[in-house]
Amino acid sequence: MNSPDTNPKQLLRMADASFNRLAEGLRYLEDVCRFAINDAALNQHLKNLRHKFTVSEWPNQQVLLDARDAAGDVGTNLEAAADKDVKRDLSASVVANSRRVQEALRSLEETAKVIPLLVSLAPADFQQARFEMYSIEKELLGKITRQTKASHIYGLYVVIDTAALKGRSHLEMTAQVIRGGAGIIQLRDKTMDRGQLLPIAAAVKALCAQHH
């Protein structure tokens, strides 16, 4: 039940802003799935969520539009200032937009406890979608991380095994395989203790770093 001090129009303004943030964030994440990581299943999952909460298909769309007051929104300039000159990589953008969606869903969940937003949507619907987004964010970041790592794997993968060197220098062999086009070098030894192997590994690592 609404309390005497509840202003339905102001709550509808809140809901309208949250629905807009929700749709914008979901659409960006859809585009990441579609164009950046080529994941059709995750793209469809996000699209289904967006369609479920798309205000344009609702009978009460006009009610929300009537409550909208973008010109009178005191937070507009604050948001613009916070986003000015912000530079992010893809992972950071996914996190930012995932949190945007999660926060919008939380706001809608609480608003729906005060005034009805749509007969077919209850606070629990927004809560369930928010929990889904926690899992989607984790899955998206995992895919981006794996894709980034895979993009750095190229050329020959050479294993330098002490037993196979037959007394030759680890560094000499490392230099030779680098000149031969090795992109990744793995140092392997099953006989030395860590104290003996560590300085060799450090020298090999330094030589690899010199050749990027």
Image: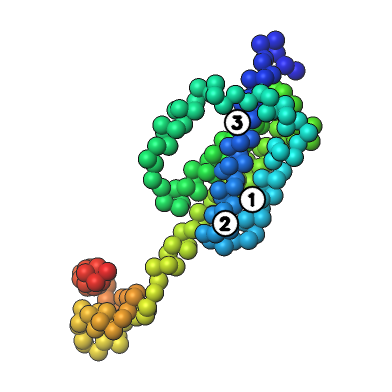
Q: Is residue 74 left or right of residue 68?
A: left
Viewer-nearest residue: 149 or 194: 149
From the image, state whether disc 3 or disc 1 is nearer to you. Answer: 3
Instruction: Kindly report the distance in space between the C-alpha atoms of the residues bearing marks 3 and 2.
Output: 25 Å
Instruction: Kindly report the distance in space between the C-alpha atoms of the residues bearing marks 1 and 2.
Output: 9 Å
Residue count near mark 3 (Cα–Cα under 10 Å), binned few <14, some 14–19, many ≥20: some
The residue beneath circle 3 is: 17
Task: Give above or below for 202 relative to 112.
Answer: below
Query: Does label 1 or label 2 sit earlier along the sequence?
Result: 2
The residue beneath circle 2 is: 33
Query: Does label 3 or label 2 sit earlier along the sequence?
Result: 3
Say if mark 1 contacts mark 2, CB within 8 Å: yes
Query: Does label 3 or label 1 sit earlier along the sequence?
Result: 3
Q: Is residue 6 left or right of residue 167?
A: right
Residue 170, position as x, y percentages in the image: 23, 80
Viewer-nearest residue: 134 or 148: 148
Say if mark 3 contacts mark 1, CB within 8 Å: no
Residue 130, position as x, y percentages in the image: 62, 41
- Quadrant that contains the C terminus: bottom left
Viewer-nearest residue: 10 or 155: 10
Q: Count of labels shown?
A: 3
The residue beneath circle 1 is: 46
Q: Residue at x 72, y 26 (%)?
A: 63
- Quadrant that contains the N terminus: top right
Task: Tell me the element at label 2.
Answer: helix
Which amino acid type corresponds to the residue marked 3 in the rendered image?
Answer: Ala
Residue 85 appears in the figure: yes
Which amino acid type corresponds to the residue marked 2 in the rendered image?
Answer: Cys
Task: Tell me the element at label 1.
Answer: helix
Image quadrant in which you'd find residue 67: top right
Q: Residue at x 62, y 55 (%)?
A: 43
Task: Tell me the element at label 3.
Answer: helix
